[in-house]
Amino acid sequence: MIKTNYHTHIYLCKHATGTPDEYFQKAVDCGYQHMAISDHMPLSEELKLRITSRRMNFDEYKNEYLPLLERSKNKFKGICTSSALEAEYFEEMLDYYPSFLEDVDFLILGQHYVKNEYGQFIDVYATLDEYLLNNYCECLEKGCASGYFKIIAHPDIYLYRKKGFNEKCQEVANRIIQAAYLNNVALEINANGIRKNRDFINDMGESVHIYPRIEFWRLVADFQKEHELKVVVNDDSHSVDDFCDESTKKAYQFASSLGIKLTEFPL
Ligand SMILES: [Zn+2]
Ligand SMILES: [Zn+2]
């Protein structure tokens, strides 16, 4: 089992608990080689008016998140520790990504909001119509092409409300796979979807996780037969107890059962 995790949340987002020290200590105890903290990026003042999302603000980012990570990274030797942010691709934030990258080691692309035809932000966990699915795809494609991101978090999240995997879902999957491949961005198998314990029966009569969705990852496995496409398993833990638990193990089993090759350390 590869022991890397690049996706972790801490108390600062206010919907998670745990400090970088606590997570890094558990990573050492579990024999990890590389561990990254990647809390949700702060939103600009303009976007805060348009999106309701519990996360750290810019003051907390500058005065708490960055100093905390700096101290914590220096404390743990013998394990590679990284600072990161989980960020959506928003045109409105384009000026911010380069400066984030001066502060942290890398960014992961977690698109939690998409825009409808009126320019309003819609939660990605809502039912996504064709317009929203296209917007989701475009955000990931532009995000990958921007060169700012190393990993796409839960790329299959667009299937959250979909029991079936129709042609459109397949088209979206293929576009995401292409974008990741062409820009050397890794796709993430997200253990937190397994942790949510919301498995259900899909239209084909198979029992599936809410994510990672087997229909999506079968396409990834097929693509990997011909191409070098990076895939990682990430925890996306929102508490230290969640980190490296049964769901993590199931995520690794999920990958190996499909014959998916995981990217070796270092990323
Ligand atoms: Zn979160
Ligand atoms: Zn996350």
Image (cartoon, rainbow, N blue to C red):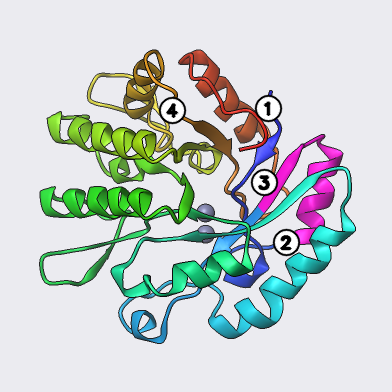
Q: Quadrant of residue 263?
A: top right
Measured Cα–Cα span from mark 4 to mark 2: 32 Å
First in sequence: mark 3 vs mark 1: 1
Q: Is residue 163 visible?
A: no
Q: Residue 4: percent from the left, percent from the top?
A: 68, 37
**Secondary structure category for the residue under label 1:** loop
In front: mark 3 or mark 4? 4
Measured Cα–Cα span from mark 2 to mark 3: 10 Å
Give the residues drawn in magenta, as a range. 20-36
Which residue bears the numbered disc 3?
242
The residue type indicated by label 3 comes to: Asp
Residue 180 numbered tag: none
The residue type indicated by label 2 comes to: Gly
- Horizontal side of residue 227 vs 126, given as left or right: right
First in sequence: mark 3 vs mark 4: 4
Which residue bears the numbered disc 4?
229
- 187 is higher (above) or lower (below) than 240: above
**Secondary structure category for the residue under label 4:** loop
Measured Cα–Cα span from mark 1 to mark 2: 23 Å
First in sequence: mark 2 vs mark 3: 2
